[in-house]
Amino acid sequence: MTEKIYAYIKNNEVVNTGVFDNPSEELLSTFISEFNLDEIVVIDDENFDWHKLVIGGTYDGSKFWELKPHPSWIKNEELGEWEPPISMPEEIPHKYTWNEDTVSWILAPIPEKLFDSWIFDNDLYKWNPPIEYPVFDPENPKYYKWNEDILNWEEIQASE
């Protein structure tokens, strides 16, 4: 016998999940009645995108939808995803964040600068150290932290 995951549905929302090993119709009916559910849906492993089964997500009768990120976003039935009502600016997408109050994309604030010597990369929209992090060698793993006093990476000792 194989255990399967079942989604508990109420008002098209996933309110809980359960794992059963070949449950009877009577057992499922009891759960539906006891928990005041609309239905219990078995998850089909072959046609299911696991990251979309989220408590609070929705079930439209045929597929699961992850949590709606913002009230103004709409379903793209073809892709099975939520989308903003207007496209994100293309020039540097990671510079923008969604603003639900204005229902638009706005320029994201510049991230906090970690160290005085670090340089802002406007293309990647992040702060970078003036010297790249040392290359990781899996044969001889070492880890580093930035030392602002010497303006370089400093190996972290096992005791730190």
Image: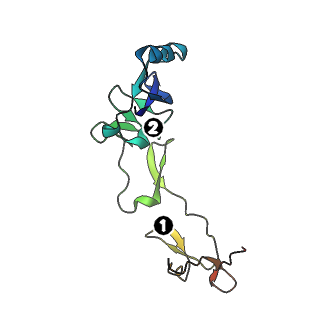
Which of the two discs, 2 and 1, sits closer to the camera? 2
Q: Position of residue 160 (x, y in %)?
A: 72, 73
Callout 1: 10 Å neighbours few (<14), some, many (20+)?
Answer: some
Q: Looking at the image, is 157 positioned above or below residue 44?
A: below
Q: Position of residue 30 (x, y in %)?
A: 49, 14
Residue farthest along the right direction in this orientation: 159
Q: Position of residue 155 (x, y in %)?
A: 64, 81
Q: Looking at the image, is 157 positioned above or below residue 123?
A: below
158 vs 7, left or right, is right
Read off the residue under disc 1: 125
Q: CA distance from mark 2 to mark 1?
A: 26 Å
Callout 2: 10 Å neighbours few (<14), some, many (20+)?
Answer: some
Q: Amino acid at mark 1?
A: Tyr
Element carrying mark 2: loop
Residue at 47 percent across and 35 percent down: it is 71
Read off the residue under disc 2: 68
Residue closer to the observer: 90 or 15? 15
Residue at 37 percent across and 36 percent down: it is 74
Element carrying mark 1: loop
Residue at 46 percent across and 28 percent down: it is 20
131 vs 90, left or right, is right
Q: Amino acid at mark 2?
A: Lys
Image quarter hosting the N terminus:
top left
Q: Looking at the image, is 151 positioned above or below residue 123?
A: below
Q: Position of residue 53 (x, y in %)?
A: 44, 37
